[in-house]
Structure formats: structure tokens, C-alpha cells
Amino acid sequence: MTRKQIIKKIGNPHLSLHAGKGYFYFVFDKSDREFDERSVYTMRLNDLSLDRWVEEGKELLNEVGA
């Protein structure tokens, strides 16, 4: 599983998934000055199922009203 596959399954062009040290984070980028993010604390993508990643991403989208 890759970050690209996760984002594709979620299907929102304003959402991206990035890797930090020991965690991943979704960024919803609405414009150059307006964005929201949500962290997921896991070391590896494969620690969660694809469905769980999609759920995490969609939770952020629901929070920002996307």
C-alpha cells in the first residue's frame, strides 16, 4: 500500500498524505493560506488497513466540511 493509493481511494483532490518521523499526517489544502491537518501516529503505512486510512482521511474531510 502507498500514500498515493490511499489518497486515490479517498478521492479528494485537496487532500494529501505526508510522512513525518514516527507518524503520518493528512493535509487538506483549500488555498495558499487556508489548510487543516490531522496526524496519525503509526510508524508504517501497513500498520493500518487501507480502509482504516480511508476512514482517517474522511474524518478530516468531515471536520472541515469538504
Image (cartoon, helix red, strand yellow):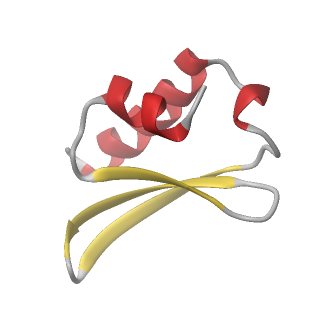
- Corner quadrant of residue 53: top right
Left or right, residue 59 beside residue 23: left
Which quadrant holds the C terminus? Answer: top left
Left or right, residue 55 beside residue 36: right
* Rendered location of residue 20, percent (x, y): 69, 64
Above or below for 57 versus 41 = above
- Corner quadrant of residue 29: bottom left
Q: Nearer the viewer, residue 60 or 4?
A: 4
- Corner quadrant of residue 31: bottom left
Q: Residue at x 47, y 30 (%)?
A: 6
Q: Residue at x 24, y 39 (%)?
A: 12
Q: Residue at x 60, y 25 (%)?
A: 1
* Rendered location of residue 51, percent (x, y): 54, 16
Q: Residue at x 75, y 49 (%)?
A: 41
Left or right, residue 8 beside residue 22: left
Q: Nearer the viewer, residue 65 or 41?
A: 41
Q: Nearer the viewer, residue 31 or 63?
A: 31
Q: Which residue lies most toward the bottom here? A: 33
Q: Nearer the viewer, residue 31 or 60?
A: 31
* Rendered location of residue 63, percent (x, y): 35, 47
Count up the numbered dots: 0
